[in-house]
Amino acid sequence: MIMSWFEWPYFKMASAVFHPAIGTLLSHHLHNSEFHREFGNVSVKSISKGLKFDVGLSTSRMEGYSSNKRNFSAVQASASQTSLVDPVSTPSNDSTNEFQKKSSEAALILVRHGESLWNEKNLFTGCVDVPLTKKGVEEAIEAGKRISNIPVDMIFTSSLIRAQMTAMLAMTQHRRRKVPIIMHNESEQARAWSQIFSEDTMRQSIPVITAWQLNERMYGELQGLNKQETADRFGKEKVHEWRRSYDIPPPNGESLEMCAKRAVAYFKDQIEPQLCSGKHVMIAAHGNSLRSIIMYLDKLTSQEVISLELSTGIPMLYIFKEGRFTRRGSPAGPTEAGVYAYTRRLAQYRQKLDEMLH
């Protein structure tokens, strides 16, 4: 039986304990006209005086994978300083401090990308980089309307364009009107050429971190094949086994178990520390990478996770508080409490938005 998100029982809510970032913390003090990007491979230049970034360097190795990654800690700044992270993630500076220090409550939004051109053609897509259809664009915009009252300080996406398009389009609907900016760290020149020299512009921006670890699972030799034709060729049972089993990969591809190893490891190392610091995070990714993360958040078994279906373009909300993830469901719309539901502080944030924007 295939179980939808909304049918999943609430008593399966997860408790997840913060896993400290591995590695040595390095402190970088920046002065006056200098700013130091805290994301990717850390570049240089331009923000306000005295900003401090703590960046941890860790090496993570998994079966079949090896990657060097940086851990991104909270930006520390005085009231007169600014950062690329939303300084008004809650109603006011005072309530921001209270929010982070007393409750450590943070929102985690998960969004599966909208329909892609290969979804439309019924092709196995996997890690092939295919953009959204018109329907997928509309789904991304609708997802943005549903989360328009939820604070977002940071965005993580896969390295694939359909996930990045979904995140960017969704944020066009957010009531804070902050601009999502992809952090380019692929080369020294890319980092230098993408610097921002306006302090005010920085305050009105949201960093977008791209990571291959959040990619869809790699479908190997099935990528680009028509799903129905593949079933006719190999048999429906064999194709169903490749698509829905937990630990059986398609030919020269990844199983869901292999996808989960990289996606969950990245979530623990890079995203969970941000939530622990009080940052509100959105992840725009894919069916299998998000199922893997949900398996971790909700402590699902390998049998339970293969029955979990995520609809394209429907955001899912978790609240992280006191080391625990609590699933709230999917926000019903931009003007309804719905299941997102409100915690008192999310309600205060929305009330403040109403006051600021009307």
Image: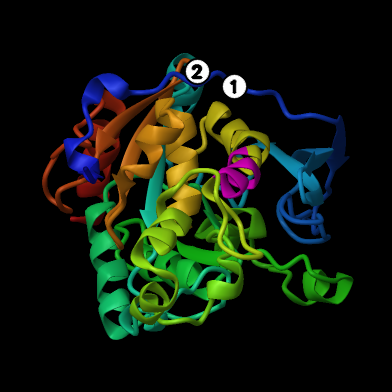
* Residue 259 to residue 253: above or below: above
Question: Where does label 1 land, which residue?
Answer: 18
The amino acid type of the residue labelled 2 equals Gly
Q: Give, as a single range, the part of the protein colored magenta.
A: 257-264
Where is residue 253 shown, x and y percent of the image?
62, 62
The amino acid type of the residue labelled 1 equals Phe
Q: Quadrant of residue 194?
A: bottom right
Where is residue 45 shown, x and y percent of the image?
81, 61
Rounded to the nearest whole Å, what is the CA distance between mark 2 and mark 1? 6 Å
Which part of the image, by quadrant, shows the C terminus?
Answer: bottom left
- Mark 2: few/some/many CA within 10 Å (<14, 14-19, 20+): some
Residue 50 painted magenta: no
Q: In the depicted view, which residue is nearer to us: 31 or 153?
A: 153
Q: In the depicted view, which residue is nearer to us: 269 or 298?
A: 298
Which part of the image, by quadrant, shows the N terminus?
Answer: top left
* Residue 353 to residue 117: above or below: above
Question: Where does label 2 land, which residue?
Answer: 323
Where is residue 159 shown, x and y percent of the image?
61, 66
Q: Residue at x 74, y 56 (%)?
A: 40
Q: Residue at x 48, y 22 (%)?
A: 104
Q: Residue 23: in sight, yes or no?
A: yes
Q: Residue 90: in sight, yes or no?
A: no
Looking at the image, residue 76 sits to the left or right of residue 149; the answer is right
State if disc 1 and disc 2 touch (CB < 8 Å): yes
How many numbered tags mark residues here? 2
Q: Please tell me whether the stretch drawn in magenta is mainly helix, strand or loop.
A: helix
Helix, strand, or loop for circle 2? loop
Q: Residue at x 78, y 47 (%)?
A: 69
Q: Earlier in the sequence, mark 2 or mark 1?
A: 1
Q: In the depicted view, which residue is nearer to us: 208 or 217?
A: 217
Helix, strand, or loop for circle 1? loop
Residue 263 painted magenta: yes
